[in-house]
Structure formats: structure tokens, C-alpha cells
């Protein structure tokens, strides 16, 4: 934990929040000066335009008017953009300039960790002292038959107990004061950090929503542009393919027609050559045969010429079709190239907008981290609700909205609060019973202490009397004062138990007989009294330990109740924040909400908080009137004072 805190401190030191705030102040002052300069320059431009309109002729003004209007509109747009940027910067400046430096808080946390380590050392020292005390008690039990060692050990134990009680009480008081001050400071710092975190969370959520909306809009526009460009490209490519296929078919038809015309020409040439050879070889034939041949030749020539003319027409038609197709192809190429250029320009503009949006997203790349932190906070805050339901309830709680989770957690905390209140009432009853029992035991211990002192004084007087009044010889009677002292000592002890009844059963001296050995009687009574006193001491220590444990349990339960009350107030504050954020008010308030609303309003009241602080300050000045306070009572009274001040 200390390593993490040191890493956070190093990160904040490297961030240098004060320098960033100073730079923001400088930029804000520069913005103010530039605004003034822009106002002056704008006024000068207005005056120059007025002078130009006055001094220039009307035809020049007519020609220049649209240009001036376009310049004016562009200047207005630039002013709007600059105002938008300045307002955005000022919003960021207002939020950043009020952030307090968390370095002192973190360093204070490091100091708190060191003090906690010191507290552990004090606990170890206290444990060692208790061990030494236990060893001394064991030694005291071993040598309790010796009067001198008993007295010395009693004095030593008393001194050690006094020293230990004084040290423990002083250290406990110091630690209580220090911890109360530290907890107050820590609570204040936590409230400040929570407020700043809530403000940052609101800003991050708003920024994330705006960024998400802009990103979705740009992605949809980009997808539409891509789909349109792909559809247009596919359509143009299909048209180009169709035209190319038509052109290929026309070229094939033209080549086929050219081949057929060439074949017909070759046939005509072969026929003419055959005809010439036949005329040369058969010039001797008759005129009728010549006429028939001439008629056949003319018929063949006429048919071939007709077919050749049709083929020429078809070739010319195909050539015209090819020219038309080439012209349409050129037009299509030009239109497609212009459309491709337009699409490329559109794509460049889209890429530019995408780059700007990516840069904006890169600047605001902490959206996922903030979202993850929000989900972590949500899971941490509302993980206790889904402990009993297992995986299904945890999945359902993750899909539930924040308001439902807050209401569920408030219900769970209310149930826990009622259970803890019931436990607290039971503990209070038990503590009252234990305190009554402790008071009775203390009064009984005081009576027994007085009785023990009286017995010790009587025994010492018996020993002195036995040493002073010895028997004068055989048959001499014991003086009446010894019998009266023993009788008074035995009759003054009330029957409190078996050991004391054994004391009362000591035989009284018989007049006229031999006097008993009072020193042996005192030695036999002293171990009984010391053992009884030891038993009472052990029982008293056990009761005091039990009372301190119960008082600590009461303090812990009271602290848990205070923490639950604070958590409920914070949850109510979050509910109020969510209701105000969504812009709705609950139609019906439950009893718990009305109670916590009154507590929330009372906590916001500065006069009530000041009165509580004054009460706490006055109560801390009060001292306990008894000279020997009961161990644990000061802690109980301090806890009672804190609860009274909080209520």
C-alpha cells in the first residue's frame, strides 16, 4: 500500500498541477487581450468599409458588395468558432483551476501509516508489559507464604499497575485525540475528493456521451459515403464492362465481315480468272454458248455485287456503331474520371474529418478508462447485494440501472441497520447489567478490602499481645484482653463465605486453662486470608476485562452504526444527485427517505454542525471527578459523548 501511495505521489509531482494552472491563467489572460484586440480591429474594419462605401462610386460598390458580404459572413463564422473555442477553454479552465493539490493529503496518508505502525509497536509493548505482569503474578503466587516477599511483591505490583494504568491511560487519551483529529481531517479530505470525483465523473460522462454521439454520426456518414461510392463504382464498372463487351462484339463482327468480303473478292477474282481462261480456251465455241456464258456471268456478277454491296453497307454500319461506341466510351470515361475525382475529393475530406475525429478521440481517450472505473466503482459499491444470489444475481445486477442498484443497496443497508440497532440495544442492556454487577462486585470488594485490613490489624495486635503477655507458669490464666481481642476480631467478621467462616470457627481461650499459641493461629489464618484476597483480585480482574471487552464491543457497534448512518446519507445524496441529473422527482417518499432527507438537510446546516463541534469541545474539557477511574470507563464516556454530539 505504501508503494502505491508513493507511486501516486510521484505521479502527481511529475504532473505539476500548479504549473498547469499557471499556464491556464496565462492563456486565459492572453485570450482576454486578444478579444480586446479583435474588437478594436473589427471596429476599424467597419469604419474602413463605411469610408469605402462613401468614397467609392456606385458601380464599384455593386461589384464589391457580394465580396464584402462573403468576407463579413466568413468573419462572423470565424468569430463564432473562436467564441465556441474560448467558451470551451473557459469551462475547462474553471474546472481545472479549482482543483486542490492532493500531494499534502497523500503525504498525510503516509504519515498515518507510520503512526499506525507506531500504534502496533505500542500494542506489542503493552502485551510485553502484560506478560511481565503475569510473570510477576506467578512469582507472587509461588512466594505468597513468605510475608516479606509478599509485601515487596505487592508494592512492586502496585507500582507496576499504577505505572501501567497511567501509561496506558495517557497513551489511550493521546491516541484518541490524535485519531479523532486525524479522522476528522480525513473525513473532510474524503468529502472534498468525493465532490471533485463526482464533478469529474459528471464531466466525463457528458464528454463521453457527446463523443459517442459524434463518433456514431461520423461512422454512419462514413459508412453511407462508402456504400454510395462502392455502389456508384460497381454501376460504372458494370456499364464499362457492358460497353467493352459490345465493343468487342462489334469488332468481332467487323473482322468477320472483312473476312467475308475478302473471301468474296477472292471468289470474284477466281471467277474472273476462270472466265478469262475459258474464253481464251473456248473461243471457238458457238455464239449461243457465249450468250449463255455471258448471261451466267452477268447473273453471277450481279449476285456477287449485290452481296458485296450488302456486306459493305454492313461494314459501314458496324464502323459507325464502333465510332458511336467509342464516343460513348470516351464520354463514360470522362464522366467516370470526373466522378472518381469527386469521390476522391470526398474521400480526402472524409479522411480529413476521420483524422480530426481520431485526434479528438485520442485526446479524449480516457473514455474507456473512465467507463471501466465507473463499472469498477459500480461493482465495488453494489457487490454486497449479489453475494447471496451467486452468478445469476451478479449478472442481473450488472445489467440493472444505477438507480435500482442504489435502492437495493439502501434496502440492504436499512435491514443491516435495523439488525445492528437491535444488537446494539441488546448490547446496551447487557452492558447495563454488567455495569450493575460490576458496581455490586466493586462494593463487595471494597467491603472485603476493609475487612481484610481489619483482620490484618487484629492479627498484628494479637501477635503483639501474645509477645507481651506470656504465661507466668503452669496454672496461670491468660489475660482477659487477649480473649476480648480474639473475640472482637472473630465477631466483627460477617459470614461472607467459607474462608471467613473458618476464621470465625477459631477456638476461644478457656479461662483457667493453658493459653493457645496465638502466633501459630495467626500464621494459619494469614494464608487463608491472602488466598481469599487473591481469589477476589482475580475475579475482579476478570470482571474488569469482561467489562472492557463489552465496552469495546459497544464502541465498535456504535462506530458501525455511525458508518452505516454516514453510508445511508451518502446513498441518499447519490439518489438526490441522480434524480436531479435525470430531471425527475420521486412522487412518493418513503419513511426512510424522509428521515434521511431531514438528516441530510440537517448535516448541510452550518449552525447545527457548529453547535455539535462546540458540544464536543466542551465535553472533551470535562474530567472525571474520581481520583482512581475504573479502566475502560473513560473510553465508554468518550464514546457516549461522541454519540450524544452526533445525535
Image (spheres, grey):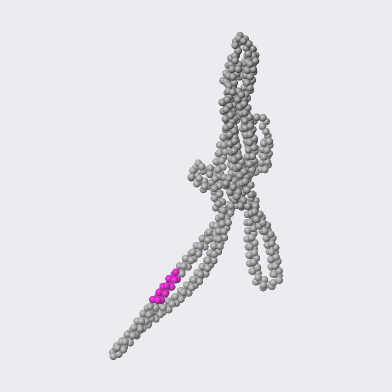
Note whether 310 is above or below 627 in the view shown: below
Please tell me which residue lies in front, 351 or 419: 351
- Does the stretch in magenta take in 244? yes
Residue 297 lies left or right of residue 191; in this view the side is left
Q: Residue at x 43, y 77 (%)?
A: 319
**Residue 324 position within the rendered picture, expressed as x and y whole percent measured from the top left:** 46, 75
- In the image shown, does 646 or 5 lie closer to the viewer? 5
Q: Is residue 315 magenta?
A: no
Is residue 284 shown left or right of residue 475? left
Q: Quadrant of residue 593?
A: top right
At x 64%, y 63%, the residue is: 76
Q: How many marks?
A: 0
Task: Please report the residue visible at 65 percent of the width from the left and 71 percent of the height from the top.
Answer: 63
Where is residue 262 shown, x and y percent of the image? 38, 80
Residue 522 found in image quarter: top right
Q: Is residue 149 above or below residue 403?
A: above
Residue 440, by quadrant, is top right
Q: Does residue 520 sit above or below 75 in this rendering? A: above
Q: Nearer the viewer, residue 245 or 644?
A: 644
Name the residue located 61 percent from the left edge and 50 percent from the top edge: 12
First to last magenta residue range: 241-256
User: Can residue 633 be spotted in the picture?
Assistant: no
Amino acid at each position: 500500500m505504501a508503494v502505491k501511495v508513493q507511486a501516486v505521489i510521484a505521479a502527481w509531482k511529475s504532473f505539476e498541477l500548479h504549473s498547469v494552472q499557471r499556464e491556464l491563467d496565462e492563456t486565459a489572460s492572453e485570450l482576454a487581450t486578444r478579444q480586446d484586440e479583435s474588437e478594436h480591429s473589427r471596429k476599424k474594419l467597419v469604419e474602413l468599409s463605411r469610408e469605402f462605401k462613401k468614397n467609392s462610386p456606385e458601380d464599384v460598390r455593386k461589384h464589391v458588395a457580394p465580396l464584402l458580404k462573403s468576407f463579413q459572413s466568413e468573419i462572423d463564422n470565424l468569430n463564432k468558432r473562436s467564441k465556441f473555442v474560448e467558451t470551451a477553454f473557459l469551462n475547462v479552465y474553471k474546472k481545472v483551476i479549482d482543483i486542490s493539490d492532493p500531494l499534502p493529503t497523500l503525504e498525510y496518508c503516509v504519515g498515518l501509516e507510520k503512526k499506525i505502525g507506531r500504534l502496533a509497536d505500542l500494542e506489542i509493548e503493552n502485551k510485553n508489559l502484560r506478560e511481565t505482569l503475569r510473570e510477576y503474578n506467578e512469582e507472587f503466587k509461588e512466594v505468597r507464604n513468605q510475608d516479606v516477599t509478599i509485601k515487596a511483591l505487592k508494592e512492586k505490583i502496585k507500582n507496576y499497575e499504577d505505572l501501567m494504568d497511567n501509561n496506558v491511560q495517557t497513551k489511550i487519551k493521546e491516541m484518541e485525540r490524535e485519531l479523532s483529529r486525524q479522522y476528522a481531517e480525513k473525513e473532510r479530505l474524503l468529502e472534498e475528493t468525493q465532490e471533485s470525483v463526482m464533478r469529474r465523473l459528471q464531466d466525463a460522462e457528458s464528454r463521453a456521451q457527446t463523443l459517442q454521439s459524434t463518433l456514431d454520426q461520423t461512422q454512419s456518414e462514413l459508412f453511407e459515403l462508402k456504400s454510395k461510392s462502392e455502389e456508384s463504382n460497381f454501376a460504372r464498372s458494370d456499364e464499362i464492362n457492358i460497353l467493352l463487351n459490345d465493343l468487342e462484339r462489334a469488332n468481332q463482327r467487323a473482322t468477320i465481315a472483312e473476312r467475308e468480303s475478302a473471301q468474296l473478292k477472292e471468289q470474284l477474282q477466281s471467277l474472273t480468272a476462270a472466265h478469262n481462261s475459258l474464253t481464251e480456251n473456248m473461243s471457238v465455241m458457238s455464239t449461243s454458248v457465249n450468250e449463255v456464258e455471258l448471261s451466267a456471268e452477268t447473273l453471277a456478277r450481279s449476285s456477287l455485287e449485290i452481296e458485296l454491296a450488302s456486306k459493305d453497307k454492313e461494314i459501314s454500319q458496324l464502323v459507325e456503331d464502333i465510332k458511336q461506341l467509342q464516343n460513348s466510351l470516351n464520354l463514360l470515361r470522362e464522366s467516370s474520371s470526373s466522378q472518381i475525382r469527386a469521390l476522391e475529393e470526398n474521400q480526402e475530406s472524409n479522411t480529413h474529418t476521420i483524422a480530426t475525429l481520431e485526434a479528438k478521440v485520442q485526446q479524449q481517450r480516457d473514455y474507456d478508462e473512465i467507463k471501466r472505473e465507473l463499472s469498477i466503482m459500480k461493482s465495488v459499491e453494489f457487490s454486497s447485494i449479489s453475494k447471496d444470489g451467486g452468478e445469476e444475481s451478479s449478472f442481473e445486477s450488472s445489467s440493472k440501472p444505477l438507480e435500482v442498484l442504489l435502492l437495493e443497496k439502501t434496502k440492504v443497508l436499512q435491514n443491516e441497520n435495523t439488525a445492528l440497532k437491535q444488537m446494539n440495544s441488546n448490547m446496551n442492556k447487557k452492558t447495563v447489567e454488567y455495569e450493575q454487577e460490576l458496581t455490586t462486585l466493586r462494593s463487595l470488594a471494597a467491603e472485603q478490602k476493609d475487612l481484610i485490613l481489619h483482620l490484618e490489624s487484629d492479627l498484628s495486635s494479637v501477635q503483639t499481645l501474645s509477645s507481651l503477655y506470656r504465661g507466668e507458669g503452669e496454672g496461670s490464666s491468660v489475660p482477659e484482653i487477649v480473649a476480648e481481642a480474639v473475640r472482637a476480631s472473630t465477631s466483627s467478621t460477617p459470614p461472607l463465605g467459607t474462608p471467613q467462616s473458618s476464621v470465625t470457627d477459631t477456638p476461644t481461650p478457656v479461662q483457667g486453662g493453658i493459653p493457645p499459641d496465638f502466633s501459630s493461629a495467626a500464621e494459619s489464618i494469614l494464608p487463608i486470608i491472602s488466598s481469599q484476597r487473591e481469589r477476589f483480585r482475580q475475579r475482579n480482574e476478570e470482571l474488569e476485562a469482561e467489562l472492557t471487552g463489552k465496552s469495546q464491543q459497544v464502541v465498535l457497534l456504535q462506530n458501525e452504526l455511525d458508518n452505516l448512518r454516514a453510508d445511508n446519507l451518502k446513498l441518499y445524496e447519490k439518489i438526490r444527485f441522480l434524480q436531479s441529473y435525470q430531471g425527475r422527482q420521486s412522487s412518493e417518499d418513503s419513511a426512510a427517505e424522509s428521515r434521511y432527507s431531514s438528516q441530510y438537510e440537517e448535516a448541510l446546516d452550518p449552525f447545527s454542525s457548529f453547535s455539535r463541534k462546540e458540544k464536543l469541545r466542551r465535553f472533551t474539557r470535562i474530567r472525571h471527578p474520581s481520583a482512581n477511574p475504573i479502566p475502560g470507563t473513560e473510553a465508554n464516556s468518550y464514546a457516549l459523548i461522541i454519540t450524544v454530539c452526533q445525535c
